[in-house]
Amino acid sequence: RITAGLLESIFNKESPLHDGAVVLGKGRILAAGCILPVSESMELPPSAGLRHRAAVGISERTIAVAFVVSEETGAISFAAQGKIEMALSESRLTELINQHYEV
């Protein structure tokens, strides 16, 4: 079962898995510490770093959606179908989680 505590422990800066992606499926963590393909899109905002490019990259190549946490600001962004929505509000984040996952 996926819990906030489990995700927090994976993404703790001291964790060896914190730099990679976590792949979720069927209510479980399927993999952690994953390296994702990076988007080469020139349409991404200049503030989009490698994590954001990887989130967009995986959403360009698969049906996956991606949530990404900025290491610098802690802001959460969402990528789907090759597009990214940056710095989500708490209400928008909740809406997207409910839309894409059974919670």
Image (spheres, rainbow, N blue to C red):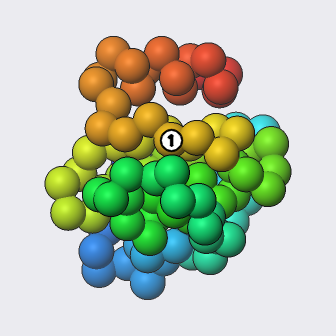
Q: Quadrant of the N terminus?
A: top right
Q: Residue at x 67, y 71 (%)?
A: 37
Does any portion of residue 55 appear in the rendered image? no
Does any portion of residue 73 appear in the rendered image? yes
Q: Is residue 103 above or below residue 57?
A: above
Q: Residue at x 73, y 45 (%)?
A: 64
Residue occupying the far front of the picture? 42
Could you tell me residue 101's position as x and y percent?
65, 26
Q: Quadrant of residue 98?
A: top right
Q: Quadrant of residue 81?
A: top right
Residue occupying the far bottom of the picture? 16
Horizontal side, residue 83 vs residue 86: left or right: right
Q: Nearer the viewer, residue 53 or 76?
A: 53
Horizontal side, residue 74 vs residue 8: left or right: left
Horizontal side, residue 66 vs residue 12: left or right: right
Q: Nearer the viewer, residue 76 or 25?
A: 76
Q: Please rate how many residues cluster around mark 1, counting C-alpha atoms within 10 Å: few if below 14, some from 14 to 19, many from 20.
A: many
Q: Residue at x 33, y 31 (%)?
A: 88
Q: Quadrant of residue 92?
A: top left
State the residue position of label 1: 84
Q: Residue at x 69, y 57 (%)?
A: 58
Horizontal side, residue 13 vs residue 77: left or right: left
Q: Quadrant of the C terminus?
A: top right
Q: Nearer the viewer, residue 96 or 61?
A: 61
Q: Is residue 81 above or below residue 6?
A: above
Q: Is residue 57 above or below residue 13?
A: above
Could you tell me residue 41's position as x and y percent?
59, 59
Q: Secondary structure at mark 1?
A: strand
Could you tell me residue 74's position as x and y percent?
23, 51
Identify the amino acid type marked 1: Ile
Could you tell me residue 63's position as x and y percent?
80, 42
